Amino acid sequence: MWLVSGKGGVGKTTIASALALREAERGGRVLLVSTDPTGALAQIFAGVGDEVRPAAPGLEAVELTRRAVLARWRERFGEEIYQVLAAVLPVERDILDYLEGVPGIEEEFMLSYLLDAADSGRYRRIIWDAAPTAATLSLLEAQALFYEHLTQAHRLYLKLRGYLQGADPSALIEGWRKLTERILEMLRGRTRAWVVAQPERLPVVQGLELMKSLRHFGIPLQRAVLNRVLPQGACPDCPPYAARAAAQQEWLERWRSASLAPVNLLLEMEGDPTDHQTLRALARLLTEEDHGDPHP
Ligand SMILES: Nc1ncnc2c1ncn2[C@@H]1O[C@H](COP(=O)(O)OP(=O)(O)O)[C@@H](O)[C@H]1O
Ligand SMILES: [Mg+2]
């Protein structure tokens, strides 16, 4: 799986879509998943929605909205969770309405959705257009935290077992713990991250932080892409342009010197790059040195 992340507005969706189109062109089925709540996949793939749909030859796409994610979460885990809670606490089913708001639940389900897609064997490559920096990280942290909670919940259950009657939540808790473990394995063992920024202070600072956090979390980095770079000296007589191009230099240098992955530069284009031909060409620039990547 390829994870594409970076600050909002830097070009994640553009680059994730470009990579997805390019990978689909190389053969084998590809899935593009956006979990960015501000995502604009529809700008590039008409008709994309919260169910997986064909988006281009060899490419399927889905935009996972919060509502769709929570509905599926409830369908898949709701009853189990209720059973476990009801075994230890005097609760009604509406406890699930409350649980939907607990931090980490939505992220947990998004990741289990990605895991299902990865394990389905249906796709040669999955490309994940992830939410902006802070949300992506909390998503990963939530995953690790959830694991901690489950381990503790399990211990607590074992202590309480003597006093409980009826439902046996032990097997369910063990099932979730395994699920979480598999998600961590997918993120650490089968995922590579593309971090995107543009040559301005905040996107660069946040992008560099993101690379550190991803590395710390154990997700290998594929590329550090600096998008929307203005060519130097392209128009020395246009004052606003020349000033902006000059201002970018500092951040370009910083990106080059501090990135934890090989750097790619993409130039500012005229108009929004949304047509598929343009995007494929853009992705070719990013992947041309790749030969047989062992990380689907
Ligand atoms: N290299 C580029 N040149 C010109 N416009 C770009 C470039 N890359 C992205 N854009 C435009 O910038 C806007 C934000 O890009 P997007 O991919 O949606 O960012 P993100 O997903 O990070 O929020 C979009 O309108 C997109 O078409
Ligand atoms: Mg986006």
Image: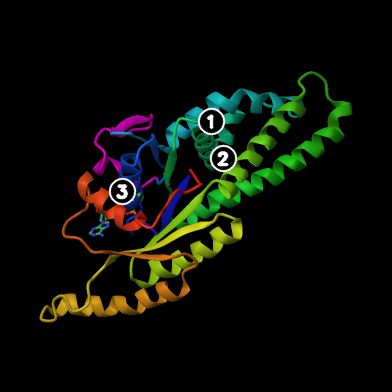
Q: Is residue 120 in view?
A: yes
Q: Is mark 1 within 8 Å of ligand 2?
A: no
From the top left corner, tell me how far across and down residue 27 is, in percent: 35, 37
Q: CA distance from mark 3 to mark 1?
A: 30 Å
Q: Nearer the viewer, mark 3 or mark 1?
A: 3
The dot on residue 73 is: 1
Q: Nearer the viewer, mark 2 or mark 3?
A: 3
Q: Residue at position x 45%, y 48% from top?
A: 292
Foreground residue, 276 or 62? 276
Question: In the figure, 175 relative to 38: above or below?
Answer: above
Q: Quadrant of residue 202?
A: bottom left
Q: Is residue 51 left or right of residue 139?
A: left
Q: Earlier in the sequence, mark 3 or mark 1?
A: 3
Is label 1 in contact with label 2 (beta carbons under 8 Å)? yes
Disc 2 is placed on an element classified as helix
Q: Is residue 266 left or right of residue 126?
A: left
Q: Earlier in the sequence, mark 1 or mark 2?
A: 1
Report if residue 84 lies within the magenta region. Answer: no
Q: Which residue is mark 3?
A: 18
The magenta span reads 37-56
Q: Is residue 275 in view?
A: no
| Direction top: furthest residue | 166
From the top left corner, tell me how far across and down residue 32 is, in percent: 38, 40
